[in-house]
Image: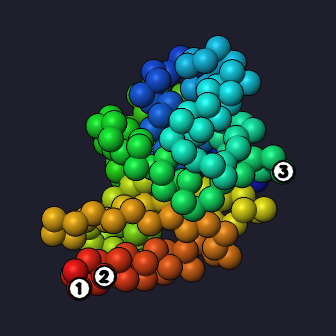
Amino acid sequence: RDSSLVPVYPGEKMSLRDLLYGLMLRSGNDAANAIAVICAGSMEQFVANMNKRAAELGMKDTHFMNPHGYHDANHYSTARDLSILALSAMTNPEFAKISSALTYDLPPTSKRGTLQIRDSSELLNPLSSYYYEGAFGIKSGYTSAAGFCYVGAAHKGEQTLLVTIMGSRTRNRGWHDMARLFNYGFAKLEDQ
């Protein structure tokens, strides 16, 4: 309940790249768990690695309790810290490509046929009234406790902005706030 899935089925064989697309585009908690085990041997070790990396990046107000962000009273972060993390992650070209994808075709496995997954960001969808020209990536999240959260970026000319919102009451309000923050940031850059 209240958990998003790719889905990843027990015994299914998928590449790490496919799991990463499932994690980023579908917010698949099942993919996050599989990635944690693949990369660190266990979810517990992966979480320890996440907290170590957060400290190295200077994320002073963040503590992870699981690899997927599902609610836990001791799992927390701030908009500032998520921005630090996103800026670091976007220096990896493969991560930048995955987090900016609008769709991805997961190849067939022994458990299912080809599955096309889509990014649900209204900012990136040209058919949406919330579309923001130049927006790309990065990651949305939602739990009933945290509300709607989003870390996104946008290009305008030579400038790139990164915006993080947390705790929005609705997704539509979140998209509206993201656009307002992008407009504010780009206007400030023009004034310089």
- Picture coordinates of residue 105, whole percent (x, y): 38, 38
Q: How crowded is mark 3: few (under 14 residues within 10 Å), some or many (20 or more)?
A: few
List the residue tagged with mark 1. Answer: 191
Circles 3 and 2: CB distance less than 8 Å? no
168 sits left or right of 116 in the view: right
Q: Which residue bears the numbered disc 3?
A: 73
Which of the two discs, 3 and 2, labels the residue nearer the N terminus?
Answer: 3
Q: What kind of colouring is applied to the model shown?
A: rainbow
- Quarter of the view holding residue 165: bottom right
- Disc 2 designates what residue? 188
Q: How far apart are marks 3 and 2 (CA)?
A: 37 Å
Marks 3 and 1 in Cβ contact (< 8 Å): no
Label 3 SS: loop
Q: Which residue is drawn at 62% across and 27% down?
A: 49
Task: Tell which residue pokes out farthest to the right in this image.
Answer: 73
Q: How crowded is mark 1: few (under 14 residues within 10 Å), some or many (20 or more)?
A: few
x%, y% of residue 106? 43, 33
Front: mark 3 or 1: 1
Q: Does label 3 or label 1 sit earlier along the sequence?
A: 3
Q: Can residue 127 be seen in this view?
A: no
**Which amino acid lies under the numbered mark 2 shown in the image of this protein?**
Lys
Q: Residue 174: percent from the left, percent from the top? A: 55, 74
Q: Residue at x 64, y 73 (%)?
A: 168
Left or right: where 16 falls relative to 166: left
Q: Badge 2 local density, few (<14 within 10 Å), some, or many (20+)? A: few
The three-letter amino acid code for the residue at tag 3 is Ala
**Res 83 visible:** yes
